[in-house]
Every structure is written in structure tokens, then in C-alpha cells.
Image (cartoon, rainbow, N blue to C red):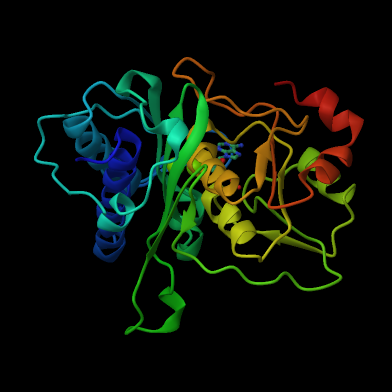
Amino acid sequence: MSSPLLMRLMASSVRAADKAADLVRKIMKGGDLGIIDKGGLNNFQTEADRSCEKLIRATLAAQYPKIKIIGEEDEETDASADAKCGMAEDVLSKQCPDEYKDVTEEQIVVWVDPLDGTAEFTQNLLDHVTVLIGIAIDGKAVAGVINQPFYNYKAGPDAKLGRTIWGVVGLGAFGFQRQELPKDSQIITTTRSHSNKLVNDCIDSMKPTDVMRVGGAGNKVLKLIEGKAHAYVFASPGCKKWDTCGPEAILHSLGGKLTDVHGNTLRYHADVKFPNTAGVIAACSDHDWYISKVPQQVKDTLKP
Ligand code: AMP
Ligand code: MG
Ligand code: MG
């Protein structure tokens, strides 16, 4: 008997993200990134953003025609494109959590960030870059993939490049190793290219021992789940639903939490506004403590 829809979609998303990662590496190797400035602060699009979104849309639409797909670059979906990329067997071998066994295509929205950390991609900070696919069911982030196409790129020419992390709430997350956080430390990870006074005021109120400024929402959630940072703090409206859906699902599958600065859960229905206007606070543990430290002025400024 075939696996439930959620696990098949997850298995297809893992493969689609793998293919997209191949494409990102190919485009980087080709040398012409085709950079377009979308306006605002460090807000770029490259050939990799455009072609990866087309690939992911075509792949998923061909197999799951009734699922709504929302992508950052708003590319056309060409469901007739030759976009077969199969399903990841390791995903299909896992049990679907009971509560998601009977989900239908109509209940699902897939959020795609074909390249997260584009500003860093254009600056050759390659390990900040990820491909993100998030699966929301009835508006809740339930499953996700974070593919890091240039993982290991500093380890030398023989190192295997890239890795895939995926997870489903109620099942767990796979493809990474967790380490212990250093004792007596309080490490906060945040933006490196979209900082402002509000972002820094919010971090200061938490009195961290270290601030790790790295690109990408996917990359920052990786820092949390691998035990390299305690919290991801971004008190600013620039981060969007495609940035958070997949990473949030993976973090939640491990018992962590991602919300806005007020502690509200984010919603991912097809008709929600794209920006996370009330910012992002995420942590593997002690999430409530971080919310309690958000200054009132930050809360007053950032409305859900
Ligand atoms: P960062 O932590 O700066 O890498 O941001 C995480 C995600 O939010 C990335 O996809 C960014 O492009 C997006 N983002 C955050 N702030 C802004 C902004 N001011 N303008 C456009 N995109 C933003
Ligand atoms: Mg992004
Ligand atoms: Mg992007």
C-alpha cells in the first residue's frame, strides 16, 4: 500500500530540494549569477532563485496538482515540464504520524524559498545558503526540508558537498547531528545583512554572551538544532512565510518553538500576508524566557 499523502509529498520535496541544490551549485560554478536588485535593503534575486523555484514548482505540481504552492519569486508553475525526480526512500520508510494520515491535497499549502540567504550567496558566503520547502496543513507548519547546497565547502575538494535536513512534527527530524551548547554561554543568532536598531535593542535585552550574525532563516534554524546557538532573534518585519514554514516545522518536530516577538504562533493558510510583520523568535528550549525579555517598545512597534 502506498504511503500517506504527507509522507509522499515530503519524500518528493526532499528529492526536489536535492535537484534544486544541484542546480544552485551548477549556476555558481558557471559564474554568472544573473543578479537582480528587488529593491529595499539587501534584497536580491539570482538565476539560482528563479530556476530553483521553477524546478520545485514543476516537480511538485506534476505529482500533486491540487496543492497550492506559494514561492518567493512568484514564478509560473509549468506542470507539463519534464520534472520527474522521484521520492526519497528514507522518508517513505518512516511512519506517518496518526493525525496526518488522512490529510488531502486541498488542506495543504507548500511554501517555497528556492534560495534563502541570497544576499550572502552573492557575497560568496556559500554555507549560509539553503533551499527551503515547508508543508503547511490547515495553516500549521507540519513538515519541512532545509537543503544546504554548499555544506562542507571549506573542507576541501574531496569533501562531499551539501546535505539535506528534513522533519515532520510528531515524527522528528533527520540529517544532522546535535552537539552540546557551550556551558555558561548564551548565544543568539540573528541577521547579518538586515540589521537595525530594533533588532539590536531586542538582542541586547537578552544579554547574550555572543551574537552570531549569519545569513538566512534556514541557516539560523540549523544553528539552533545543531546546538550552535540558543536562540534566533529577529525583531523586524522583513522575514516571510516561505522563510519560516519549513524551518519552523523542523524545529517543532524536535520540541523547539518559533513564534513572533509576542509569542504568537505563525499561520500558513494560502491567504495569509507573506511578511512575518511581528518578527521571529525561535529556540530549542526556554522559548518563553526569550519572549519575556522582548522590550515593550519592540512589542509596540511590531504588530502581528
Ligand atoms: P536574514 O536573517 O537577514 O538572512 O533574513 C532572513 C530572511 O528574511 C531572508 O530570506 C531575507 O531575505 C529576509 N529578510 C529579512 N529582512 C529583510 C528585508 N529588510 N528585506 C527583504 N528581505 C528581508
Ligand atoms: Mg529567504
Ligand atoms: Mg529566497
- How far across and how far down the image is residue 23, in percent? 25, 55
Q: Quadrant of residue 108?
A: top left
* Quarter of the image that includes the C terminus: top right
Q: Quadrant of ligand 1?
A: top right
Q: Check the image and report above or below for 194 versus 102.
A: below
Q: Check the image and report above or below for 211 versus 17.
A: below
Q: Check the image and report above or below for 57 versus 284.
A: above
Left or right relative to 229: residue 174: left
Query: Can residue 292 be seen in this snapshot?
Result: yes
Q: State how many labels appear.
A: 0
Left or right relative to 30: residue 33: right
- How far across and how far down the image is residue 285, in percent? 74, 52
Query: Can residue 32 be seen in this snapshot?
Result: no
Left or right relative to 86: residue 110: right
* Quarter of the image that includes the N terminus: top left
Which residue occupies the extreme top position in the image? Answer: 271
Q: Nearer the viewer, residue 290 or 54?
A: 290
Q: Nearer the viewer, residue 117 or 284?
A: 284
Residue at screen point 59% across, 36% down: 239
Residue at screen point 51% across, 56% down: 120
Q: Nearer the viewer, residue 175 or 203?
A: 175
- How far across and how far down the image is residue 269, in percent? 48, 20
Q: Check the image and report above or below for 232 versus 158.
A: above
Residue at screen point 59% across, 39% down: 41
- How far across and how far down the image is residue 115, in percent? 41, 47
Q: Nearer the viewer, residue 105 or 112?
A: 105
